Image (tube, helix red, strand yellow):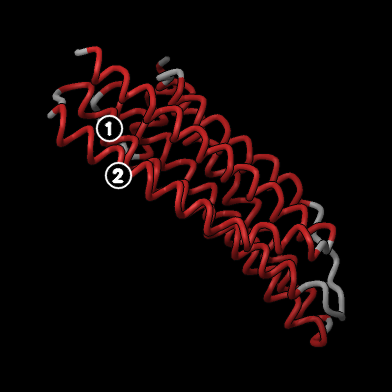
């Protein structure tokens, strides 16, 4: 690898991690705004989305410049390809955080519906997945990436349980249907954030091992059990 390519790849990783940190903060704020019915936090997430969009555009432009200038091959090409995919996943996470913030603002209006207890556990697991998927990228840790993929099933179970609880409450109290639907949407958005973290983990496996595991959960599980 040339010194110029190595420098540009290092700068690319730095820019991607800056974007990741901004997105992770947006996710935290959006969930807090939901739980605390905090309009100020929610508005910060909504306003901040344009900054994330600009950062996402910058990372994509840098990836394309490296491809054009250096014409990388093998592992360097996989690294840039993974960076492009991760960049997209992060931007979509930010959009979902913005959607959660919008639902949070709606939920400040009465009648108020209680936030399900399991939402906090679902949030904790989802943010762990986001953080560990990015750690696996930084450290080129395929084993950690596979662990993230396995967590996705647990998030799906939380999502199912919360939605069932919300449906029951809305059936018991029709006046809460509007608020219940907003919370329903926020929960689904959180579940989708976990899906994007899983996608990042799968991209890391491809980067490290050159193996495409997307849509192959059985292969991921087998690798975990055998390691």
Of 4 and 95, the residue lying toward us: 4
- Residue 143 numbered mark, or none: none
| Residue at image coords 23%, 23% | 76
Image position, residue 52 (x, y; %): 51, 51
Of 107 and 58, the residue lying toward us: 58
Distance from Cα at disc 2 to Cα at disc 1: 11 Å
Residue 26 left/right relative to 215: right
The outermost residue toward the bottom is: 175
Image position, residue 75 (x, y; %): 22, 21
Please identify the quarter of the rendering in which residue 202 is found: top left
- The quadrant the C terminus occupies is top left
- State the SS at label 2: helix
Please identify the quarter of the rendering in which residue 224 is found: top left
In this rendering, the answer to whether 105 lies above or below 226 is: below
Q: Earlier in the sequence, mark 2 or mark 1?
A: 2
- The quadrant the N terminus occupies is top left
Q: Are marks 2 and 1 in contact (CB under 8 Å)?
A: no
Q: Tell me the crowding category of disc 2: few under 14, some 14 to 19, or many 20 or more residues within 10 angstroms, Cα based.
A: few
Q: Which residue is mark 2?
A: 61
Q: Tell me the crowding category of disc 1: few under 14, some 14 to 19, or many 20 or more residues within 10 angstroms, Cα based.
A: many
- State the SS at label 1: helix
Of 226 and 159, the residue lying toward us: 159
Image position, residue 138 (x, y; %): 45, 23
Q: Which residue is mark 1?
A: 80
| Residue at image coords 74%, 75% | 106
Of 43 and 137, the residue lying toward us: 43
Residue 165 left/right relative to 158: right
């Amino acid at each position: 690898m040339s010194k110029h390519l190595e420098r540009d790849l290092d700068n690319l990783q730095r820019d991607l991690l800056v974007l990741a940190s901004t997105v992770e903060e947006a996710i935290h704020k959006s969930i807090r705004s939901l739980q605390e019915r905090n309009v100020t936090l929610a508005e910060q997430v909504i306003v901040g989305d344009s900054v994330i969009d600009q950062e996402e555009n910058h990372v994509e432009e840098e990836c394309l410049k490296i491809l054009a200038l250096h014409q990388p091959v093998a592992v360097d090409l996989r690294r840039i390809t993974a960076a492009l995919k991760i960049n997209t996943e992060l931007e979509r996470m930010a959009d979902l955080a913005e959607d959660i913030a919008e639902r949070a603002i709606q939920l400040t209006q009465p009648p108020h519906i209680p936030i399900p207890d399991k939402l906090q556990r679902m949030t904790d697991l989802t943010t762990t997945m986001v953080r560990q998927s990015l750690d696996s990228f930084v450290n080129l840790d395929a084993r950690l990436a596979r662990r993230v993929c396995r967590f996705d099933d647990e998030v799906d179970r939380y999502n199912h349980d919360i939605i069932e609880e919300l449906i029951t409450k809305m059936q018991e109290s029709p006046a809460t249907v509007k608020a219940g639907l907003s919370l329903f949407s926020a929960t689904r958005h959180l579940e989708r954030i976990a899906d994007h973290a899983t996608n990042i983990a799968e991209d890391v496996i491809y980067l490290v091992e050159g193996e495409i595991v997307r849509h192959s959960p059985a292969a991921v599980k087998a690798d975990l059990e055998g390691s």
